[in-house]
Amino acid sequence: EIVLTQSPGTLSLSPGERAALSCGASQSVRSNYLAWYQQKPGQAPSLLIYGASTRATGIPDRFSGSGSGTDFTLTISRLEPEDFAVYYCQQYADSTYTFGQGTRLEIK
Amino acid sequence: QVLLQESGPGLVKPSETLSLTCTVSGGSVSSGNYYWSWIRQPPGKGLEWIGYISYSGFTSYNPSLKSRVTISVDTSKTQFSLNLTSVTAADTAVYYCARGGVLLWGQGTLVTVSS
């Protein structure tokens, strides 16, 4: 089972600032089969990034994903008020999928 | 456009079996080479993948839940189901169904385990 560890647990920033969220894997994620999701209160998660770096349809270009192997990053270039939420990484390379524990992005 | 919708009891008694169904509209569970997953989220906590069934009927389960979980496909091929046996309060969560490795999510349904 691939264990995903996200850091930091909570990130406090202001609108307009840049956010960098990390996701580390316990073993290499084959073919960079890693996705990022955003979840707002009371809602299902929604897809932001797949294949480590490909934005999903309709996702603004201020969201970008990077990394390979065991280290991945979600970057939000300039935070908008609607970006404050919880973010999860997920790997779908292994026969058992796993999620990171999440990073809460809160307004400073 | 494919949509997924969870349904089932919102309240289950301890030691009983939790049973949920996911209805797929705009597609079939047996087509498209997709994997069909169940995921849960306890109140205030993170996401936990429960397991999936493939378009061909292959299943894979979270090792921590494997002894209690069964995922199956309905013969109509437009639904798939989750059975979780011997539930406790720790199984209280919002349960989501989803399609794919890159997940397309249903809206989720809250299941509470309580007597």
Image: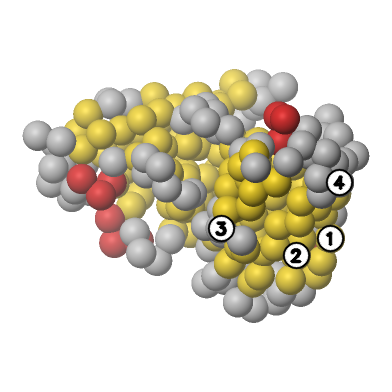
- Assess disc 1: are there few (<14), some (14-19) or many (≥20) residues with their C-alpha within 10 Å of its C-alpha: some
The disc numbered 3 marks a residue on which chain? A
Disc 3 to disc 4, C-alpha distance:
19 Å
Disc 2 to disc 4, C-alpha distance:
16 Å
Q: Quadrant of residue B111?
A: top left
Tell me if I can see residue B78 in this picture: no
Name the residue type under label 1: Ser
Q: Dot 2: what SS?
A: strand
- Residue B63, percent from left and from top: 40, 66
Q: Are marks 1 and 3 in contact (CB under 8 Å)?
A: no
- Assess disc 4: are there few (<14), some (14-19) or many (≥20) residues with their C-alpha within 10 Å of its C-alpha: some
The disc numbered 4 marks a residue on which chain? A
Name the residue type under label 4: Ser
Q: Nearer the viewer, mark 3 or mark 2?
A: 3
What residue do we see at 65% from left, 21% from top?
Answer: B26
- Assess disc 3: are there few (<14), some (14-19) or many (≥20) residues with their C-alpha within 10 Å of its C-alpha: some
The answer to whether residue B82 is above or below residue B109 is below
Disc 1 to disc 3, C-alpha distance:
19 Å
- Residue A33, percent from left and from top: 73, 60
- Residue B69, percent from left and from top: 33, 52
The disc numbered 2 marks a residue on which chain? A
Residue carrying label 4: A77
What residue do we see at 71% from left, 29% from top?
Answer: A82
Q: Quadrant of residue A70?
A: bottom right
* For residue A86, side relative to residue B72 (left or right): right
Q: Looking at the image, which residue sits at the far front?
A: A108
What residue do we see at 36% from left, 30% from top?
Answer: B110
Residue A72 circle label: 2
Residue carrying label 1: A66
Q: Nearer the viewer, mark 1 or mark 4?
A: 4
